[in-house]
């Protein structure tokens, strides 16, 4: 799935000065994308489903952080549910009609943008909990978390509307496609607008929020009396920032180069084909970030792992293996936490 009208699934790109054959790009996509999309779907679906399960069954959604984590998992699941259809599309052609084309495009975009927005909310939530702990006691409530989550979903739907409205299924050359089709008189405006919106909301905004919030968090953590736990929290923060940048920056760079090919002198057919191939690889890399979310936001936390282990012991293992001695003990209930100079007795979970 791609923002560009020069989709790698196209046989021909008519947006250039002369029609550009895309047969080679499509053949590569047919071999490369289905197995990659399938792998991302399976690993991401299992991971995010486990996150949702633990949050609902074990943690009981008792905090604003839990609410945001659940919504992030739901966002990733919506995004992931569309991947089997794009995998089939890459290998063959679009066979599900115009309604399913727009529906799946909507789920893809809504899942993508809502996921970004909930990552931003989680960053702000962590900033408040550590840097402004006294204020956070009043502001970080379940009710406020539900309200902001509702607004976030509404904003995600709104910013996804252009992609949904302009996407349709029609015959392109010898095959049916599901792709954006902008009005001829406004083609360049909407194409550029979509690419810039993707880059600003998908990369610039979250990185800006992360840099501001995590700078404040680091200053607070550096005053922490417990050096071991301080270093663990600092490592987690850098992992979140670096992983997000590594997974999504390449795609956004290629997206800008592909959208503004003429400005960068890349409007030849051979350059366009190479950009489309780069788009396939970098977009798939970006998609795998939703598989990483359960790891960096949940499973790196000892408390969350204990919840998950306890749930499996209670509901899964003991049901099928009651005599297995290794599963007879209860899960430990240790929680890694830190104390900062600004919070006094306020305890802050390092790994959520």
Image (spheres, grey):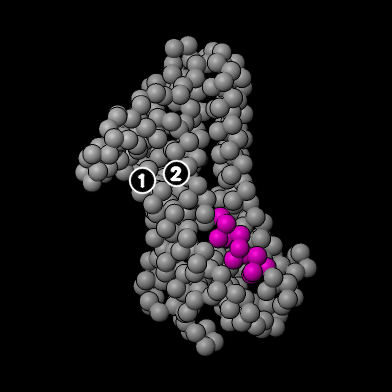
Which of the numbered marks, if any, corresponds to residue 294?
2
Where's residue 229, x and y in %?
Answer: 54, 22
Q: Quadrant of residue 218?
A: top right
Q: Are marks 2 and 1 in contact (CB under 8 Å)?
A: yes
Query: Which image quarter holds the C terminus?
Result: top left
Q: Secondary structure at mark 2?
A: helix
Region rendered in magenta: 275-286
Where's residue 36, x and y in %?
Answer: 52, 64
Q: Secondary structure at mark 1?
A: helix
267, 93: nearer the viewer: 93
313, 2: nearer the viewer: 313
Residue 175 lies within the magenta run: no
Q: Is residue 68 above or below residue 29?
A: above
Dominant SS of magenta comes to: helix
**First of labels 2, 1 by sequence position:** 1
Name the residue beneath numbered marker 1. Answer: 50
Q: CA distance from mark 2 to mark 1?
A: 8 Å
Which residue is at 49% across, 84% downward?
175
């Amino acid at each position: 799935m791609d923002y560009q009208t020069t989709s790698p699934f196209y046989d021909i790109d008519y947006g250039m000065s002369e029609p550009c054959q895309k047969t080679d790009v499509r053949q590569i996509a047919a071999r490369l994308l289905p197995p990659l999309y399938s792998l991302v779907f399976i690993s991401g679906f299992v991971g995010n489903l486990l996150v949702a399960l633990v949050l609902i069954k074990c943690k009981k959604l008792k905090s604003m952080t839990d609410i945001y984590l659940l919504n992030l998992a739901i966002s990733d699941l919506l995004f992931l549910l569309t991947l089997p259809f794009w995998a089939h599309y890459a290998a063959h052609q679009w066979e599900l009609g115009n309604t399913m084309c727009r529906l799946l495009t909507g789920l893809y975009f809504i899942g993508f943008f809502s996921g970004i927005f909930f990552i931003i909310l989680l960053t702000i939530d962590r900033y408040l909990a550590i840097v402004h702990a006294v204020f956070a006691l009043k502001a970080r409530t379940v009710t406020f978390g539900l309200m902001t989550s509702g607004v976030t979903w509404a904003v995600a739907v709104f910013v996804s509307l252009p992609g949904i409205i302009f996407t349709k299924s029609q015959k392109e050359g010898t095959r049916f496609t599901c792709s954006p089709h902008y009005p001829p008189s406004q083609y360049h405006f909407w194409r550029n607008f979509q690419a810039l919106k993707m880059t600003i909301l998908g990369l610039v905004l979250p990185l800006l929020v992360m840099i501001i919030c995590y700078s404040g968090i680091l200053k607070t953590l550096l005053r922490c009396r417990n050096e071991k736990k301080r270093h663990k929290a600092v490592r987690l923060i850098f992992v979140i920032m670096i992983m997000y940048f590594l997974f999504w920056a390449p795609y956004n760079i290629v997206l800008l180069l592909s959208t503004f090919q003429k400005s960068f002198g890349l409007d030849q057919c051979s350059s366009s084909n190479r950009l489309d191939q780069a788009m396939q690889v970098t977009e798939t890399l970006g998609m795998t970030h939703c598989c990483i979310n359960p790891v960096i936001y949940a499973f790196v936390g000892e408390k969350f792992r204990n919840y998950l282990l306890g749930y499996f012991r209670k509901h899964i293992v003991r049901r099928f293996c009651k005599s297995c001695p290794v599963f007879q003990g209860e899960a430990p209930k240790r929680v890694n936490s830190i104390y900062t100079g600004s919070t006094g007795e306020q305890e802050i979970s390092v790994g959520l």
